Structures are given as structure tokens and as C-alpha cells.
Amino acid sequence: MRRGLRKTTPRVKGGQVQRKNHRDLARPHAGALEVIVEAPARGFRHLVTPALLREFLPLIPAWGEVSRGLKAIILDEGSGGCEGWYDDGVIGLHAWPDSIATTVCAWHYAAHRELWARLGVAARAAPEYLGAVEFSADTSGMHRRAFAALSERYGLYDWAVESGAAADEWIVRDESDRPARPAVVELIRVGDALHLYLRSVFMRFDRRSAAAYQLLHVLLHELGHHVDARRTRRGLLRGGEGYAERWALRCADRIWEACLARLEGARL
């Protein structure tokens, strides 16, 4: 199961953000932070429990100030394309896949490889076959057909092609505004066809490293959105994903060892 391209994905249905009808969350917040547990969807489990969450939150520097206006943290049901979300003072942390070890796309791996290495999560290449287009001597035309197939599937249109490691091989880089510019697809000639392989990476998480990632990065990233929202009177996320990511990384550095020590004694 490939993790999605973004961590922050509000629940949307029919163009409207869904709040799961938690009536308390619609009112102005005044009181203790709520921790709400949703039943995991089929194929998912909660590694982060309310008890573990309540041990972790006080580790966050200036937690009392940072959490001002935060209404609830929802341990959500799980999603193959989303790890967490933030919406109007509510943070959602999705349940983790039952398999624990998981496969991620090249975008996600490029953005988090240093963090996962620090957590000791082993990685190996796990390319996914996407299909093929007809090979032709018109290389540029052939590449355009490949790009059309990729754009239809992923909705991304800013690609660049480079020569690969061998003759009749190419790699495709994402040239959009994603900072890492990862190589996301390999094009390999096999006979009269050009085969497309999505670069994916199998991450050998265990329960502790997955829970650590959820706490030290996913949760902190969404909390970074909350901090960002409080910088404007209207609660606008003017700093976007970049602000939330930088905030999460800085905060994680300060509490890394303390969090891992808590997890060492936790039953997961």
C-alpha cells in the first residue's frame, strides 16, 4: 500500500470538508483537549493510543502556548493516501496499516528519507509496473506518450526526462514545485515497447519506528499547521506545507530522545 503524496489531506466529500459530526468540535473551544478514537478501518490499526499521546504531548516545548485553540486530536480510521490532517483546530492522525511495513512513492521517500534513516527504518527499492507505450525511433514523441499516461494517472504535468544507467533506459524527474525533484519513473525498452515503472520504496517499519514516525513527524507536522493558523486573525495557513514541515523538524530535534525513551517502555 503506497502512502500518499501529501500528509495533510482534509476529508472532503462533495466539495465540503467533512467533520464526522463531532458536535463538540463545532463550538468555540474552552476546556481540556479532547482525544477522540475512531474505530480503525479494515486493514489498519492504532499504534498511537490516547495514553501514549498524553505522555507525548507535554514533551513539546511550550505545549501550553502551542496548543492554545486546539480543540481535539482524532485518532482517525486510516487511509491509504493520507497520514494525517488539520482543519480548524482539529488534528487527525490516521491509523497505520496492519502490515506495519509499507511501500511509499518516490516523492514521499525523497521528502522523508533522512528522518526514516534516523529512526533506523531499512529501505529497499520496490518498483511498480505501470504499463507500456509503443517504442519508436521518434524518442521525443515516444516520451510525450509516456508523459500523457503519467499525467492522466497522477495529474502532474511538469516532467523532465534524462538518460538512464543503460542504453534504451530513461528516468523521469518531477519538475514541479516539490523541492526534492525526485526521479519518479523509469522508462525501459523491452522489444517494441517502452515499459513504465513507478519508483517505489519498501520501508521495513516495525511498531515502534512507525509510532515514532507518527508522533515525531506526522503529528508535529499537523501541529505546525495549527501554529501557522494562529499567526493570522482569520486562521489562514499562509505558511503552507513548508512552514508545517520546518516547524515539525525543529520540534522533533528538541524532543527526539525523550520521545524514543517513552516508546521504549510502551506496549505497542
Image (cartoon, rainbow, N blue to C red):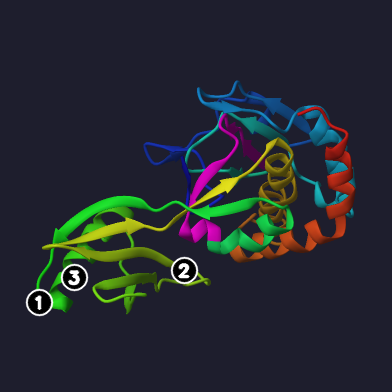
Residue 87 image point, x, y percent:
60, 44
Q: Residue at x 40, y 74 (%)?
A: 175
Would residue 98 be counted in the magenta stretch?
A: yes
User: Dot 1: what SS?
Assistant: loop
**Which residue does the numbered mark 2 point to in the structure image?**
182
Determine the image quadrant of residue 33. top right
- In this image, 192 relative to 99: left or right? left
Q: Is residue 56 above or below residue 44?
A: below
Dot 3 amino acid type: Arg
Q: Residue at x 50, y 34 (%)?
A: 18
Q: Earlier in the sequence, mark 1 or mark 3?
A: 1
Work out which quarter of the rendered image holds the C terminus and state it: top right
State if disc 2 and disc 3 touch (CB < 8 Å).
Answer: no
**Which residue does the numbered mark 1 point to in the structure image?**
137
Q: Residue at x 85, y 50 (%)?
A: 60
- In space, the residues marked 2 and 1 are separated at their CA atoms by 27 Å
Q: Is residue 28 visible?
A: no
Would residue 36 be counted in the magenta stretch?
A: no
- In space, the residues marked 1 and 3 are separated at their CA atoms by 13 Å
Q: How many marks?
A: 3
**Which residue does the numbered mark 3 point to in the structure image?**
144
Residue count near mark 1 (Cα–Cα under 10 Å), binned few <14, some 14–19, many ≥20: few
- In space, the residues marked 3 and 2 are separated at their CA atoms by 19 Å
User: Dot 3: what SS?
Assistant: helix
User: Dot 2: what SS?
Assistant: loop
Range shown magenta: 90-109
